[in-house]
Image (cartoon, helix red, strand yellow):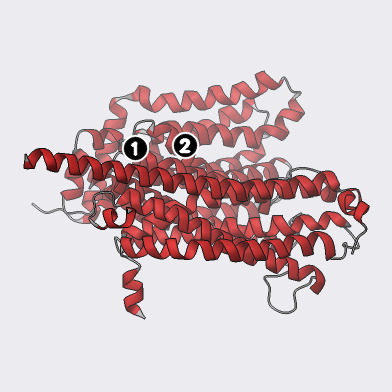
C-alpha cells in the first residue's frame, strides 16, 4: 500500500492517473449533479418557512463546503510540498487554488441572493459571512503570490506557506455559528445525531454535495495534468506522454 | 411535485432562485473551460520545448 | 568570540533601533500618515461630533492598520538587499532569533509610537477621555499582532517587484479579525459598556500570533533567501 503513496510523488504516474480518472469523475459528477438538481428543484417539498427559496441550499451549501474543503486540501498539499519537498504536492496546491476561489464566489453570491428574501438584506457583517469573505481574499493572496516569483519553485514554497498560515480561517468559518450569535443558521447536516432536515430535502442535498466533490476531482485532474507538465517540461517521460 | 407553471415561479422567489442556479452553472462551466485551456497551453509549451531541444540537438550533431 | 542568544537578541535590537533613529523621517512618516488619514474621515464625511464619535473606533483602527503597512515593507528589505540578512542568518544564532529581534524593534518604533500618538487622534475624533485606556491597550496588542503578521508577509514578499502591494494583499485579510475586535473593544469603552470580552479576544489573538508567527516568518525568509 505504501508503494502506491510513493508512486504519487512521481510526475509521470500522476499525469497518467489523472488522465485516466478525469472522464470517470466527470461522468459520475454529471449523474449525481443531474439527479440532485432535478430532485431538489422539482420533487423536494417546499419549506414551511422559506417556501421555494430554500432550494438555493442545493447550490449554496455545496459551494460553501467546497470552498473550505478545497482550501484545506490546498494547505495540506502545500505542506507536503514544503516539508517533504514533493513537487507533486505543490502541483496539487496550485491546481486547487482557482477552483476553490470560484466556489467561494459561488457561496458568497448565492448566499447573498438567499439572504435578501430571508433576512431582508443582501449582506450582513456577521461572523460566518465575514470569515467566508476573508477566505476569498486569502485565495486571491495565494493566487497572486505564486506567479510573483521568478523562480517557480520558490513561488510554490511561498504560496504553500501563505496557504498554511491562512488555514486558521477554516475552523473559524465552521465554528462561527457555534461561537457567536450569528444571523446564519447553525449546522443542519454536519453534526452528531439526526440531521435536522427532512429526508426528502436531504437526499438531493447529499447528491449535490457528492456531485460537487466528484466534479472537483475531475477538474482537479485536468488542471493537475497542466501543472505537472509545466513543472516537468524538461523531463524525458514528457515526450512519451505527449504522443 | 409542483405544477409546471409554479415550477418557474418558485413560489414568488424566482428572481432569487434562478440566478443562483444560473451562477452555479456558469461556475461549473468556467471550471471545465479554464482547466482544459490550462492543460492545452501546458501541452503546447511542452511540445515547443521538445522541438527546441530536438533542433538544438540536430545543430550540435551536424 | 561567541555570543549567547539573549545577548545576540539585544545586539540585533540595538542595531535596529540605532538604524531607525538615524533616519528619523522614516519613523515619523507612518505616524504623520496615521494623523492625516484620521483627519480625512471627518473632513470627507462632514459629520456632527456625535456621529463622528460612533465612527471613531473603526476610523482609528483602519488608519492604524494602513500606517503600519507602510513601515512593514522596510522590515527586511534593506538588509535583504545588501546581503546583511544572509550574513546574520549564517551567524550561528539562528534566523528565528534575528527575526524576533527585528520584529520587536519594529513594533517599538512603529506600533508603540502609534499608541502614544493615538490620544491626539482620539481627541480629533471626539473620543471621550475615559475610553482612552481601553483604546490604547487594544491598539498596543493590535499593533504587536500586526507587526508579527507583517513579518510573515514581509518575509514572503521581500525582494519581489510590487512587493508592497502583495504585502498588503497578504496581511490585510489576516488582520481583519484584529480590526473587528480592536474596534469592538474601543467601541464598547466609548459606550461605557465593559470591553473585557473584546480585550480578552484581542489578547488571545495576540498571544496566538506571537507564538506561531516567528516560525512562519522565519520559514518565509528561508524560502526567500535560499
Which residue is more in the foreground, A208 or C126? A208
Left or right position of C213 against C1: right
Where is residue A231 shown, x and y percent of the image?
31, 50
What numbered label is drawn on residue A170? Answer: none
Q: Quadrant of residue C132?
A: top right
Determine whether B30 is above or below C51 in the image. Answer: below
Vertical position of residue C31 compared to residue C12: above or below: above
Badge 2 is on which residue? C168
Residue at 16% in and 49% down: C90
Q: Secondary structure at mark 1?
A: helix
Report the label total: 2
In the figure, C135 relative to C222: above or below?
above
Q: Is residue C210 visible?
A: no
Q: Nearer the viewer, residue A54 or A11?
A: A11
Task: Pick whichever, C49 or B40, lies toward us.
Answer: B40
Crowd around label 1: few <14 · some 14–19 · many ≥20 (10 Å): many
Q: Position of residue C188 (x, y in %)?
A: 70, 45
Identified at 68% across, 44% down, the residue is C189
Q: Residues within 10 Å of mark 2 (few under 14, many from 20)?
A: many
Left/right placement of residue B3 relative to residue C110 reads: right
Distance between mark 2 and mark 1 Cα atoms:
14 Å
Task: Give the residue drawn at x 24%, y 42%.
Answer: B51
Return the mark for residue C75.
Answer: 1
At which x and y percent is residue A221?
Answer: 46, 59
Q: Nearer the viewer, mark 2 or mark 1?
A: 2
SS state under label 2: helix
Q: Position of residue C180 (x, y in %)?
A: 62, 45
State the quadrant of the N terminus of chain A: bottom left
Q: Residue at x 56, y 25 (%)?
A: C37
Amino acid at each position: 500500500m505504501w508503494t502506491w503513496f510513493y508512486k504519487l510523488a512521481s510526475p509521470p504516474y500522476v499525469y497518467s492517473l489523472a488522465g485516466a480518472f478525469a472522464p470517470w469523475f466527470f461522468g459520475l459528477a454529471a449523474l449525481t449533479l443531474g439527479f440532485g438538481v432535478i430532485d431538489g428543484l422539482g420533487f423536494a417539498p417546499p419549506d414551511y418557512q422559506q417556501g421555494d427559496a430554500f432550494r438555493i441550499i442545493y447550490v449554496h451549501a455545496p459551494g460553501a463546503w467546497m470552498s473550505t474543503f478545497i482550501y484545506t486540501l490546498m494547505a495540506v498539499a502545500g505542506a507536503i510540498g514544503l516539508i517533504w519537498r514533493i513537487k507533486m504536492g505543490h502541483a496539487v496546491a496550485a491546481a486547487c487554488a482557482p477552483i476553490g476561489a470560484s466556489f467561494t464566489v459561488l457561496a458568497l453570491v448565492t448566499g447573498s441572493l438567499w439572504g435578501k428574501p430571508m433576512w431582508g438584506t443582501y449582506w450582513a457583517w456577521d461572523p460566518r459571512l465575514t470569515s467566508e469573505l476573508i477566505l476569498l481574499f486569502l485565495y486571491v493572496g495565494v493566487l497572486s503570490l505564486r506567479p510573483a516569483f521568478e523562480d517557480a519553485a520558490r513561488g510554490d514554497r511561498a504560496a504553500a506557506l501563505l496557504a498554511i498560515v491562512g488555514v486558521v480561517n477554516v475552523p473559524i468559518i465552521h465554528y462561527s455559528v457555534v461561537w457567536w450569535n450569528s444571523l446564519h443558521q447553525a449546522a443542519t447536516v454536519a453534526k452528531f445525531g439526526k440531521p435536522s432536515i427532512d429526508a426528502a430535502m436531504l437526499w438531493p442535498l447529499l447528491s449535490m454535495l457528492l456531485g460537487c466533490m466528484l466534479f472537483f476531482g475531475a477538474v482537479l485532474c485536468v488542471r493537475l495534468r497542466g501543472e505537472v507538465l509545466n513543472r516537468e517540461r524538461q523531463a524525458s517521460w514528457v515526450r512519451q506522454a505527449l504522443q | 411535485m409542483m405544477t409546471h407553471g409554479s415550477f418557474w415561479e418558485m413560489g414568488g422567489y424566482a428572481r432569487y432562485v434562478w440566478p443562483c442556479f444560473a451562477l452555479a452553472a456558469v461556475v461549473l462551466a468556467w471550471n471545465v473551460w479554464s482547466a482544459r485551456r490550462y492543460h492545452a497551453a501546458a501541452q503546447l509549451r511542452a511540445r515547443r520545448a521538445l522541438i527546441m531541444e530536438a533542433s538544438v540537438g540536430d545543430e550540435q550533431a551536424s | 568570540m561567541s555570543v549567547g542568544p539573549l545577548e545576540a537578541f539585544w545586539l540585533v535590537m540595538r542595531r535596529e533601533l540605532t538604524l531607525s533613529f538615524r533616519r528619523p523621517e522614516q519613523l515619523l512618516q507612518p505616524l504623520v500618515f496615521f494623523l492625516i488619514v484620521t483627519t480625512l474621515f471627518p473632513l470627507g464625511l462632514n459629520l456632527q461630533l456625535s456621529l463622528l464619535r460612533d465612527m471613531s473606533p473603526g476610523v482609528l483602527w483602519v488608519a492604524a492598520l494602513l500606517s503600519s503597512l507602510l513601515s512593514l515593507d522596510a522590515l527586511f528589505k534593506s538588509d535583504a538587499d545588501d546581503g546583511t540578512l544572509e550574513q546574520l542568518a549564517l551567524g550561528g544564532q539562528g534566523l528565528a532569533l534575528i527575526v524576533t529581534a527585528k520584529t520587536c524593534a519594529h513594533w517599538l518604533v512603529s506600533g508603540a509610537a502609534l499608541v502614544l500618538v493615538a490620544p491626539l487622534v482620539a481627541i480629533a475624533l471626539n473620543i471621550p477621555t475615559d475610553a482612552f485606556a481601553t483604546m490604547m491597550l487594544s491598539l498596543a496588542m493590535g499593533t504587536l499582532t500586526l507587526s508579527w503578521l507583517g513579518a510573515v508577509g514581509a518575509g514572503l514578499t521581500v525582494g519581489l517587484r510590487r512587493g508592497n502591494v502583495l504585502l498588503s494583499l497578504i496581511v490585510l485579510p489576516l488582520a481583519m479579525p484584529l480590526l473587528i475586535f480592536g474596534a469592538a473593544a474601543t467601541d464598547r469603552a466609548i459606550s461605557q459598556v465593559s470591553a473585557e470580552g473584546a480585550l480578552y479576544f484581542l489578547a488571545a489573538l495576540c498571544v496566538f500570533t506571537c507564538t506561531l508567527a516567528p516560525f512562519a516568518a522565519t520559514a518565509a525568509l528561508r524560502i526567500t533567501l535560499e
